[in-house]
Image (spheres, grey):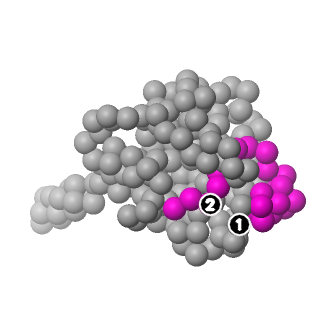
Amino acid sequence: MKKIIFCIIVIIMFLFKSSAIANYDKIFFDFKIESNSGEIIELNKFRNKIILVVNTASYCGFTNQYDDMQKLWENYKDKGLIVLGVPSNSFNQEKDNNKEIKEFCEVNFNINFPITTITKVKGEYAHELFKWAEKNHGKSAVPKWNFHKILINKSGKVEETYSSFTNPLSEKITSKIESLL
């Protein structure tokens, strides 16, 4: 009976495994995204860095993670980490415009890491960066909610993804970042 239960558990685990075959016809550094102030961020300027991409929202229960995103940035930016905030209204919890978001982040959380313009992060109209992450890493790269995290390694490939519940300063994230730096 124990063998049958074990086999069922193993089968279920494989059914929920969602990594795609990563052929990486493009890497993270091949993309561009618009900054909060309207300039184009050429992601190749982050080459040879570790990047934590986080889709954010101002009216979310996880919004206080901005504090820990800023601390993570301050702790590791000189060692080669980029924290990239990607405000999104994909879950209907973001402010109406980029100026309001920038002000909200600066006043409430003293944010100075790079932030993009309001960006779709899931579905048919998702930014190509998020479609690329799903194609190459599977469903775990698709944000299920705000403050989903995608860790990009120095090669420009998805290293790991983390749910909204995983705090940016968690041992899980910081130990992975330290191993990649």
- In the rendered view, does 135 fall on the left or right side of 91? left
Residue 97, which numbered label?
1
Image quadrant occupied by the N terminus:
bottom left
Residue 118, which numbered label?
2
Q: Measured from the top left, where is residue 74 in percent x and y?
A: 77, 38
- Identify which amino acid the numbered label 2 is placed on: Ile
The residue that appears at 43% across and 40% down in the rendered structure is 158
Q: Does any portion of residue 2 appear in the rendered image?
A: no
- Identify which amino acid the numbered label 1 is placed on: Asn
How far is disc 2 from disc 1 in space, using C-alphas?
7 Å
Query: In the rendered image of this protein, does residue 91 appear above or below residue 137?
Result: below
The residue that appears at 32% across and 48% down in the rendered structure is 135
**Along the polypeptide, which appears first: circle 2 or circle 1?**
1
Q: Measured from the top left, where is residue 117 in percent x and y?
A: 64, 55
- In the rendered view, does 143 fall on the left or right side of 114? left
Image quadrant occupied by the C terminus:
top right
Mark 2 touches mark 1? (CB < 8 Å):
yes
Q: Does any portion of residue 4 appear in the rendered image?
A: yes
Q: Which residues are magenta?
A: 99-120
Category of crowding for the residue at label 1, using alpha-carbon neighbours closer than 10 angstroms: few (below 14), some (14–19), many (at least 20): few
Question: Relative to the observer, which residue lies in front, 21 or 42?
Answer: 42
Question: Relative to the observer, which residue lies in front, 53 or 94?
Answer: 94
Q: Residue furthest bottom?
A: 92
